[in-house]
Image (tube, coloured by chain):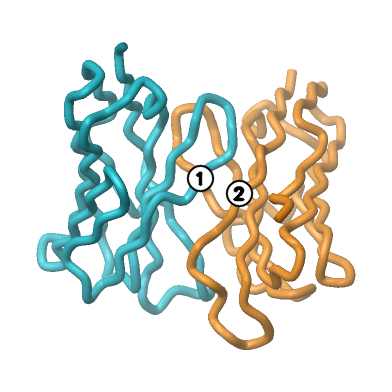
Chain colours: A orange, B cyan
Amino acid sequence: EAGVAQSPRYKIIEKRQSVAFWCNPISGHATLYWYQQILGQGPKLLIQFQNNGVVDDSQLPKDRFSAERLKGVDSTLKIQPAKLEDSAVYLCASSSGTGGVRPQETQYFGPGTRLLVL
Amino acid sequence: SQQGEEDPQALSIQEGENATMNCSYKTSINNLQWYRQNSGRGLVHLILIRSNEREKHSGRLRVTLDTSKKSSSLLITASRAADTASYFCATDAIGGTSYGKLTFGQGTILTVHP
């Protein structure tokens, strides 16, 4: 089966500009996650969707970050305006499980988008 | 904040040797998972151990879990150059704000020399 797809793979922008990342999860996976991974650290969860609803966005900097998952499939993560400290790899992951059922424990990760803010 | 802390931060060994990485965490968990990340790429799930399990095997991987000490170890036996990667533990905490939310540690960088 096809894995989690992400685009673009690399992005270089200047501070205060905006940027958007796209993710297409594994077909049929109800749960979608966005992580931020700063160089030398482990991934940090930004937001979790169950179908098209937000389950957890407690660590999303909502003054500049936004995410949506229209129709419960693809998702977009946006940063506006970007800061230098947003330079990181943005990882999308998905897991199976539907409705109110606990999502399948294994998460499948995409290749990530490497963002550099100058 | 990071839930898991891996030790050591970096490990360098020769091909054929065993590699052991440790993970400590702070809160009660549903399960603990280990992931591998090759340089600049996405994470790959290796193994999951539930809170009521003490040991689990998968191929050359052996994971142990001690919930009384809030710690886990990952053993890779007969290492290969292809095992060179960063290894992360991730915990699914009990009572979290969302199902399936994982908190990752800082990772151990493993280098296996041919």
**Disc number placed over residue B76 in the picture, else none:** none
User: Real-space Cα distance between discs 2 and 1?
Assistant: 7 Å
- Say whether residue B26 is left or right of residue B43: left
Label 2's element? strand
Q: Is residue A104 above or below residue B90?
A: below
Q: Residue at x 82, y 23 (%)?
A: A13
Q: As rendered, which of A88 and A75 lies closer to the eye?
A: A75
Tell whether label 1 touches label 2 (CB within 8 Å).
Answer: yes
Extreme residue toward the bottom, this view: A100
Q: Is residue A50 left or right of residue B33?
A: right
Seen from the viewer's position, the closer of residues A80 and B48 is: B48
- For disc 1, the marked residue is B44
Q: Which residue is mark 2?
A: A109
Instruction: Quadrant for residue B6, please give it.
Output: top left
Amino acid type assigned to the residue bearing label 2 in the image = Phe
- Return the residue found at the far left: B68
Which image quarter holds the C terminus of chain A? top right
Q: Could you tell me the amino acid type at mark 1?
A: Val
